[in-house]
Image: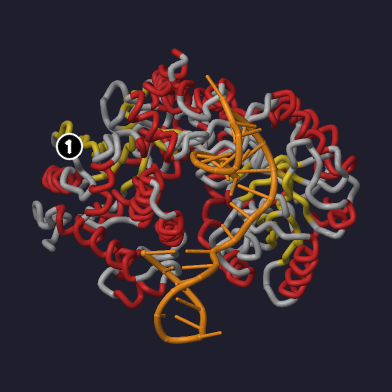
Amino acid sequence: MEIGGICPLNSLRRDNLLSMDNSSISKVFADIAVLMQAKGENVFKVRAHSNASDAIKSLPFPIAGIVDDATRLGEIPGFGEAIVEKTQELVRTGRLGLLERLLEELPDGVLELVQIPGIGPKTAVAAATELGISTFEQLAASIESGEFQSLPRISKKSAAQILRHAKMRVDQGERIGIGSAIEAANNVITELKTRCPNISQIEVAGSVRRMSELVGNIDILCSVPDNESAITIIDAFTTLSNVYDVLSHDDKHAVFTDRAGFKFSMYLVRPEAFAGALVYATGSISHGIRLEELAAGKQLKFTSDGLFDSASETLEPLDSEKNAYGRLGLSFIPPEMREDAGEIERAVDDDLSSIVTSDDIRGDLHSHTNWSDGRYSMEDMVAAALERGLEYLAITDHSPSATVANGLKPDMLLAHNAAVRELDQTAGVRLLTGTEMDIKPDGSLDYSDELLADLDLVIASIHSGMDQDEDTMTHRVIAAMESPHVDVICHLTARLLGKRSPVLIDIDAIFAAAVRTGTVMEINASPDRLDLSAEHVRRGMDMGVIFAISTDSHHTWQFDNMRFGVSTAIRGWVESNRVINTLSYSNLMAFLALPKSERYAFNKSRGQ
DNA sequence: GCCGTTTTCGGCCCGACTGTTTTCAGTCG
């Protein structure tokens, strides 16, 4: 590598950097499983591919890194000779003959249609073959015309549910979930830094940095010392391994799309302009306009290249975003709040320090182990929690109704409690016994009051009967909230971000019942869910609801998802003292020891 | 296709729900 901030032009061609990440490899095996099932292949063969897909997803390291070591690959659970060979073919060549053959044999659209809840491989093939449906738009149109209902086993009611999900996908367009977006952005930044090690300041900006739930493109801001470096970085950016089509590029700006059509933009500024430019590039358009107005009132000009003195056109020296906001007469506004939703007015005389941050979180109240459907042992999960500095952790495995999740029957729950209490002696993290208990379709609970009374923490959720009408669903959840033992309602809307529509439920009625019964509402931090939206959370704040932010971890590394939950809370303007897992362990236990009717008052008057 | 093993092939997680349902296939979690 040459000296002076320069990396050689095209020093590495994209072929050399073609490395597939675990999620793309996992998806290939999941796709194969779907297509095999659609073809009617042996169910166990299908399951083997599906298991391989799950195993790859849960690996704590990149599988591409061990692709040449067949022995190590074979040690992955569910990996036999055939799966090892397919993995090697896929990682080495970027393609898989089997997948290509399956796609050729089956009609277009199967992999898209099966993403809609209610449509499995067989129905997808029927819809594609008999009705020529291959897109969500065509699916929606076919249901609206009544044509889709001619397929086997499709009733009016199921068609209505499918239409709801299909319309969501149409509305969503090309946007992707924030979890995938962050992963894609990090991959780009990591590769760019490898190619150009002299990059000193680079940040993702735009809606990704604001942690919007769904994002349509990824904006990256980078600083460069001179024009020569700029050309080098633009060159590297436009030849990254995921570049499919370069839409535009000049000496300070470039845009490309990847194979899926997703857009990546980069903007270059001088180092001294970086802080101001980052503020400009992060906020929503209307947030930016508000800042421009504030700047104009101070004889300043706020642009994509930083903050300038209007008269002299000289750059204002700013070394941080805090500084930039300060120059405009505002407190620092967290990126997640920069939506022009009232945050600017508030930042005039409030330092926003009461808003929850990741540092405030002291424990996690929702996790799974291999006692039910978690991937790791209790000991592994506890070690991972300890590594992340958590003060306490609730082990909340599933209840009996969750049969596929291997829900714990009563005797197993008792054994589970004993195991948690024993591990608590040596864990280094305080452990809470608990359950994630199913709320059954009629609103009844999955364990007896006697069993529930013995647990430190009961979180309850729905996993079945998700197409109930709004009234039934709302009453069902409220019935569970009336129980003196149900501490937290978790993943209330059961949506899967970008994949499954939320259930029909009256959120305001639920929040009112939460306040009335003393029940806590979970902000589920999994980026696949972000189950209460920021809008919901903000409404809950207005109504006085108390929240828990929990990761719902099934894997050790999923504890890192906490930041997605915290970001949702920040987007919803949640105050730190309205989140129970910002309490110390002893205060949390004191909170849980109270009858539910006294808990909201306790929290209101609490210290930290 | 994987796994465990009485090492060469039989078993693999399953219960609930739904449908121009009638004895079962498809889907979900």
Residue A412 coordinates in the image, percent (x, y): 75, 65
Q: Residue at x 26, y 44 (%)?
A: A223
Q: Mark yes or no: residue A212 visible.
A: no
Residue A597 is drawn in which quadrant?
A: top right
Q: Quadrant of the N terminus of chain A?
A: bottom left
Q: Nearer the viewer, residue A7 or A90?
A: A90
Residue A121 coordinates in the image, percent (x, y): 42, 40
Q: Residue at x 25, y 72 (%)?
A: A68
Q: Decide: is A142 above or below A467.
A: above
Q: Residue at x 74, y 30 (%)?
A: A511
Residue A170 horizontal side relative to residue A337, left or right:
left
Q: Decide: is A137 above or below A13.
A: above
Q: Mark yes or no: residue A164 visible.
A: yes
Q: Nearer the viewer, residue A204 or A484?
A: A484
Residue A596 horizontal side relative to residue A541, left or right:
right
Residue A319 horizontal side relative to residue A341, left or right:
left
- Which color mode does the image show? secondary structure
Total numbered circles: 1
Q: Decide: is A153 above or below A94.
A: above
- The answer for which chain carries disc 1 is A
Residue A71 coordinates in the image, percent (x, y): 33, 78
Residue A89 horizontal side relative to residue A140, left or right:
left
Q: Nearer the viewer, residue A263 or A302?
A: A263
Residue A418 coordinates in the image, percent (x, y): 78, 71
Residue A46 is drawn in which quadrant?
A: bottom left
Q: Which residue is mark 1?
A: A245
- SS at circle 1: strand
Q: Nearer the viewer, residue A315 or A398?
A: A398
State the residue lying farthest toward the top. Answer: A145
How busy is the neighbourhood of tag 1: few (under 14 within 10 Å), some, or many (20 plus)? some
Amino acid at dot 1: Asp
